[in-house]
Image: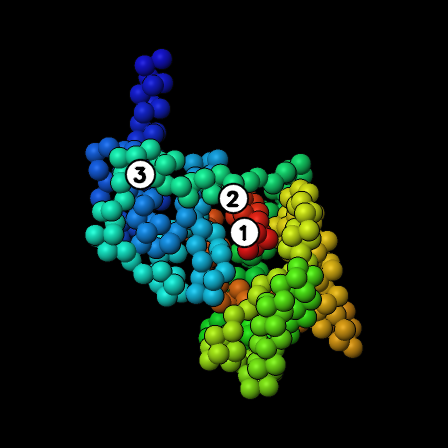
Amino acid sequence: MKKTCLLSAFILMCITQLSPFSIAGSLEEASNDPITSFRDQVVQLESAYGIEVIQDNFGGYLYFYRDSKGNRHVSNNMENILDESSLAQVTMPASSAEMSERDLSEEPDEDLDFFDEFDEFYEEISDPLEPVNRFFFHFNDKLYFWLLKPVASGYKTVVPEPARIGVDNFFSNLAFPVRFINCLLQAKFEGAGYEWGRFMLNSTIGIAGFFDVAGKHFDIKEYDEDLGQALGSYGFGPGFFINWPFFGPSSLRDSIGDAGDAFLNPIYYFDLETNYKIAIKAFDEVNDKSLTIGEYEDLKKSALDPYIAFRDIYFQNRQSKIKE
């Protein structure tokens, strides 16, 4: 019994020392009181970086933040978030005087009222197909490392970044009907107006959408809306989690939404054979992955159970978008 207790204490000590908070060099050293230390770090994250933190069911942490466009994201890798220049543009570090005004002697629920928001925000999705989903997760994982990543890496080496960003802008502009219609379905008329303005500017001055003139020069943000979010705003639940081969994480509701959005994408109406349409979508995916190589690896590396981590991150991100 004593050996078991000692072993448990040793494991707990290791976990504490390897907490994700320890990788953020900008945070202060931990104090002798573990509870106060934890709360100090959470306060710093909230005040200095605008990051919301919750602990998942597997000992890891989820970090919620907004980019320069105001879109909410979730990640389980703190180091990457603090390195993002887009985060620095929307949140400025708080001064030491402002930090000292926080009364850390109160109970966490009274002092850090944003934890109440976490309890409401953090939900879990049903996963009755977990064995099948895990199989396809590992299938997609091998597909990424054996095929998609090598192709995207080679493409990245040959094609300069400005050109790849231009291609990404082009496909985003092409998908304007998806965002526009779903803004209308949710009565987000301001968003629909912004989307229309972006499309007109980027399609003309931006040369068929290769340049994001609307966002860069007119500060007209993109509204990332889809049919899955529209259904969610009408009260349709996610159903259950589905990890599709090739397409990745989804839910019953979002799978139906993706099928509907496909009919809104102009590519569907191109007078081309099916294999050419598939090739266009594959090219879009390779170009997109060439701009994000390393993100998947970092998330997977930092997760105790990558399948659970990606499932939770996907679901929390979708719930966040629906509530916006």
Q: Nearer the viewer, residue 210 or 248?
A: 210
* Residue neighbourhood size for the residue with mark 2, other residues' Cα within 10 Å, grouped as few (<14), some (14–19), many (≥20): some
Which three-letter amino acid code belongs to the residue tagged 2? Phe
* Residue neighbourhood size for the residue with mark 1, other residues' Cα within 10 Å, grouped as few (<14), some (14–19), many (≥20): some
Residue 281 sits above or below residue 76 on the image = below
The residue indicated by pointer 3 is 38
Which three-letter amino acid code belongs to the residue tagged 3? Phe
* Residue at (61, 50) in percent of width and height: 249
The residue indicated by pointer 2 is 121
Q: Secondary structure at mark 1?
A: helix
Quadrant in the picture for residue 116: top left
Q: Secondary structure at mark 2?
A: helix
Q: Is residue 228 left or right of residue 60?
A: right
Residue 295 sits above or below residue 155 on the image = above
Q: Which mark is residue 320?
A: 1
Asked if one can make out residue 89 in the rendered structure from this viewpoint, the answer is yes
Dividing the image into 4 quarters, which one contains the N terminus? top left
Do tag 1 and tag 2 residues touch (Cβ < 8 Å)?
yes
Q: Is residue 310 left or right of residue 79?
A: right
Q: Is residue 162 left or right of residue 109?
A: right
Which three-letter amino acid code belongs to the residue tagged 1? Ser
User: Where does the image place residue 101, in percent across and percent down from the top left?
Assistant: 24, 47
What's the distance in space between the residues labelled 2 and 3, CA to CA?
21 Å
Q: Nearer the viewer, residue 168 or 101?
A: 101
